[in-house]
Image (tube, grey):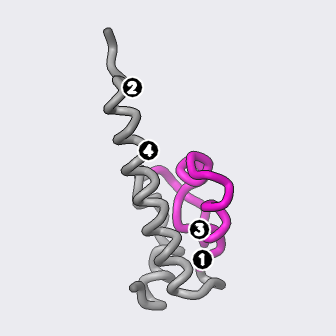
């Protein structure tokens, strides 16, 4: 569970916690990382200061799980390798 101060500090943070690119203030992830997510997972990560803490925490956990599973599955099938 995230506290209100943690959500506010994440919203004020200048860089994306996933890729370290610059992000828009008020969002949890940068535009590039949000674009990689499915459409139903993007909205809870935008304007996080105005949303409930549990909703933001759940959305961040789901996004982290999606990125881990998605990129792990690509690696298992040889994606990203140069032959």
- The CA span between labels 3 and 1 is 6 Å
Residue at figure coordinates x 52%, y 70% from the top left: 59
Residue at figure coordinates x 40%, y 41% from the top left: 71
Q: Is residue 54 magenta?
A: no
Tell me the mark number nearer the camera, choosing from 4 and 3: 4
Mark 3 touches mark 1? (CB < 8 Å): yes
Which quadrant of the view contains residue 45? bottom right
- The CA span between labels 1 and 2 is 33 Å
Tell me the mark number nearer the camera, choosing from 4 and 1: 4
Residue at numbered disc 2: 79
x then y, percent, for residue 34:
58, 54
- From what the image shows, is residue 79 above or below residue 9? above
Assign a secondary structure to mark 4: helix
Can you tell which mark lies on residue 45?
A: 3
Q: Is residue 24 magenta?
A: yes
Can you tell which mark lies on residue 48?
A: 1
Mark 4 Cα shell of 10 Å, populated few (<14), some (14-19), many (≥20)? few
Mark 1 touches mark 2? (CB < 8 Å): no
Tell me the magenta residue range.
21-48
Mark 2 Cα shell of 10 Å, populated few (<14), some (14-19), many (≥20)? few
- The CA span between labels 4 and 3 is 18 Å
- From what the image shows, is residue 45 above or below residue 69? below
Assign a secondary structure to mark 1: helix
- From what the image shows, is residue 58 above or below residue 64? below
- The CA span between labels 4 and 1 is 24 Å
């Amino acid at each position: 569970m995230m506290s209100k101060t943690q959500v506010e500090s994440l919203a004020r943070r200048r860089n994306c916690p996933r890729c370290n690119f610059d992000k828009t203030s008020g969002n949890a992830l940068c535009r590039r990382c949000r674009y990689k997510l499915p459409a139903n997972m993007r909205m809870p990560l935008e304007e996080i200061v105005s949303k409930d803490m549990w909703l933001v925490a759940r959305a961040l956990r789901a996004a982290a799980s999606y990125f881990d599973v998605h990129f792990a599955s690509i690696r298992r099938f040889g994606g990203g390798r140069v032959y």
